[in-house]
Amino acid sequence: NAGVTQTPKFRVLKTGQSMTLLCAQDMNHEYMYWYRQDPGMGLRLIHYSVGEGTTAKGEVPDGYNVSRLKKQNFLLGLESAAPSQTSVYFCASTRYRGVSPLHFGNGTRLTVT
Amino acid sequence: AQKVTQAQTEISVVEKEDVTLDCVYETRDTTYYLFWYKQPPSGELVFLIRRNSFDEQNEISGRYSWNFQKSTSSFNFTITASQVVDSAVYFCALSEAEEGAQKLVFGQGTRLTINP
């Protein structure tokens, strides 16, 4: 059971470069989320999706774009990376009905120099 | 607005001691859900418990127990007879959604170190 898979696991970017983080889930979950984790700040929601073809802003969306072209995938893009985007990024998913716990991926550690 | 505060940034205890991690939350909703997650040194996030606002019964799972008190807006987590494997960062989180997207608001986390 793969659950939620994030690629890549690590990445180093230079300021101004772009990249896409991929999240894939095999649980047929409707909802998917991107969080970032920074020391002393817990996890903060960047963007989320309530279904294929939909996206919505979370608490800290600036500098990021997302797409959900297929139900199982949720992509997080950085068009012009900045040092402030150095963080650990977590993808998560939940099913449609009821209040279920988030299933998290193992994270992507991104460093922007 | 929702807010979760974990005032203890770091806690260090000796193995076999009991330890309590504090969590205080703010919300204007009467229906909400509280969660605890564990993040071991390997980095993944492990779900521990979910509690809704209408269920104030304390819960025990092995060495873990949770004390939910609406009167003080707290959802504290106690580990009894701690073990080295309990060393991790622990996050408390809050969600106001009954259905749909679970936009969790997390506390800052408490780093727990259990020394042998």
Image (tube, rainbow, N blue to C red):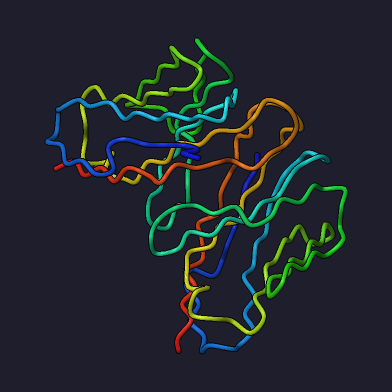
The N terminus of chain B sits in image quarter: top right
User: Which residue occupies the foreground of this view, A48 or B43?
Assistant: B43
**Taking B12 as reference, is A43 above or below it?**
above
**Taking B57 as reference, is B63 above or below it?**
below
The C terminus of chain B sits in image quarter: bottom left
- Name which residue lies at 19% across and 25% down: A18
Residue B61 percent across, percent down from the top left: 73, 67
- Name which residue lies at 48% across and 64% down: B89
| A95 on left or right of B84 | right
Residue B23 percent across, percent down from the top left: 65, 62
Task: Answer with the quarter of the image where residue A73 lies.
Answer: top left
Q: How many marks do you count on the picture?
A: 0
- Name which residue lies at 49% across and 74% down: B85
**Taking A30 as reference, is B64 above or below it?**
below
- Name which residue lies at 62% across and 50% down: B93
The residue positioned farthest toward the front in the image shown: A1
User: Which residue occupies the foreground of this view, A50 or A78?
Assistant: A50
Residue A107 percent across, percent down from the top left: 38, 44
| B11 on left or right of A86 | right
